[in-house]
Image (tube, coloured by chain):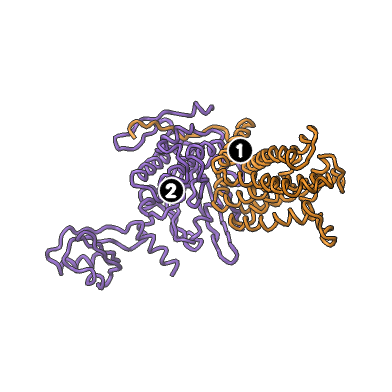
Chain colours: A orange, B purple
Amino acid sequence: MNNMIMETYVNNGSMSMSLGKTLRAYLIEAKYAFISILRIPVLPITMMALPVFMYMLLAVTVVSRLAAENPNVAVSFFSGFLIFAVIGPGLFGFGVGLAIERQGGILNLKRAQPMPPASILIAKMITAMACTGFTILLLIPTAMKFGHLHLASGQIVNVVLVSIFGVLPFCSIGFLIGTMVSGTGAIGIVNLIFLPMLYLSGMFFPLPEILQPWARVWPTFYMNQIVWSAVGIESQIDVKICILILLGITVLCTGLAARRFARVG
Amino acid sequence: MSCKNQLHTLDQTSDTGEISVNKNIINSSRSQSQNRIIAELAGVYKRYGNTVALDGIDLKVPGGKLLAILGPNGAGKTTAISLLLGLKKPDAGKVTLLGKSPMLLEARRQVGVMMQEVTLAPEQRSRELIDLTASYYPNPLAVEEVMELTNTTPFAKRPYGKMSGGQKRQVQFAMALVGRPRLLFLDEPTAGMDIQAREMMWSIMRQLVRGGISIVLTTHYLEEAEALADYVVVLAKGRIVARGSVDEVRTRVARKQISCLTKKGVDEIGDWPGVQGVRKENQRLYITVIDAEGVVRRLLEEDKDLQELEVSRAGLAEAFMEITQEITQ
């Protein structure tokens, strides 16, 4: 310790954070969230590769045949797998990830430290949006090559934007789950709503008549309508209403989760 | 004052082996923080269901001192710390942290925290963890400086998950210091550390306190509290059962310890009146007694060859045991 230089800890500076320093805290949080994903790529790769891989299997075997008879089938399958790709990072990446961190006490530590209140959430949202964006950029050319999907460049832009922002309601649902259950419990809960969300919203297959009204319970139903509209097919419900409903889900779930996070951690 | 201007290169290691701090800075900080209550629980109650965690306690954290909060498991230590850090709200009573509500970021920006039960991201490197924590504070120290101070530079690039328990504690200590806090909460800071790392941490803690920084320490190592604490608070069943300086708490206990080299056996002495416990270490007997004079007299009468007789007052550990046993019985 002979050559050690020690700093003093006397702190007479202001305790308020400038806008620049606050922004820097958000950026650093996002930077390390990205780095973490790159270092443990198994989960994101699974989340990103699975929809594309499954789509390819179906595109080669089923979609190409059905799409020749009905062009909407190509859009329907593409939309279904696109939403599959959107849900994964939101529910699993965000929700389960948050629950695991909460279980490990990281969130409690960050609450005790003066972490800007939303920085970890925004960092995780940005990461989920980036994962989704990357998946969609793989899925679109795959669908256009193997799935008889024809999109103009403007439609591609629409689809990418819809996908990236479409992550947010699912992040908010993941956030709510992540603040309510443990890390191990979250995996089970997310699986419990993930599969019904995909199949009971009628994205992939026509639902039996008795289940059709219940499709509207699921946020994926409204997301599906928005994707259809983005590729130029008329939706069953006004897209503005769909956007408002998803926005409402986002605000409601985020609000409930933030309240619980602030009170319980 | 700019961040750079607040950084002062300090003197190198002193003759006593401790890191020495620029005297002017110590004095200026001391004058600001001493004789001041820096955090407080006033008449605080907290329940979890039917369990009373804190039963109307008043706890003051003095400025520029090290306060050790001791107590058996379930005594309410963690709840008290959680309230002071704004992680929980009291059912009744008032909590203040640096004159403000602990829920306010402005208050917590003056606090450094080291928690015991935290599993940090295993893939993140120690430098990154410290850098991220630094970003939460308005005037943090440079990451490299705090790593050098806490001896974490050698494993700056090591993933947290691949560090030993002691190295993890050192990184968490660096995270607690990097924000240049006025008040440090250290929960079992030296658990799992080797002697060298523990001595380093103790030395830094002593210097910080001399420099006017306040520390709240919770520890199961009573010798740690005995070595470092200016004040001790003993909690049991959600109440403060003893408080004061280490000496004051020790003197509350009637027990004394006799040690000597004697031919008498452990079992035989254990049956004597006034003897509460006997153990033998390296031929030496250590006898915990209530009536020291009577036991010494009998020892001298029964063993004419008795050597190296010493009588000492009970240590903090004995005091802690006695005080908490009284409450829990």
Place of residue A127 in the rendered image (x, y in percent of width and height, measured from the top left): 64, 40
Q: Is residue B307 above or below residue A247?
A: below
Place of residue B166 in the rendered image (x, y in percent of width and height, measured from the top left): 40, 47
Pointer 2: residues within 10 angstroms few (<14), some, or many (20+)? many
Depth order, front residue of A35/B68: A35
Q: Say whether residue B182 is left or right of residue B10.
A: right
Place of residue A80 in the rendered image (x, y in percent of width and height, measured from the top left): 75, 48
Say what amino acid the circle numbered 1 marks.
Ala
* Element under disc 1: helix
User: Would you name the residue on which mark 2 appears?
Assistant: B189
Say what amino acid the circle numbered 2 marks.
Pro
Q: Is residue B202 above or below residue B91?
A: above
Q: Is residue A168 above or below residue B153?
A: below
At 80% across and 34% down in the image, what residue appears?
A: A152
At 85% across and 46% down in the image, what residue appears?
A: A241
Q: Say whether residue A144 is left or right of residue A119.
A: right
User: Would you name the residue on which mark 1 appears?
Assistant: A30
Question: Chain letter of disc 2?
Answer: B
Q: Do marks 1 and 2 share a chain?
A: no
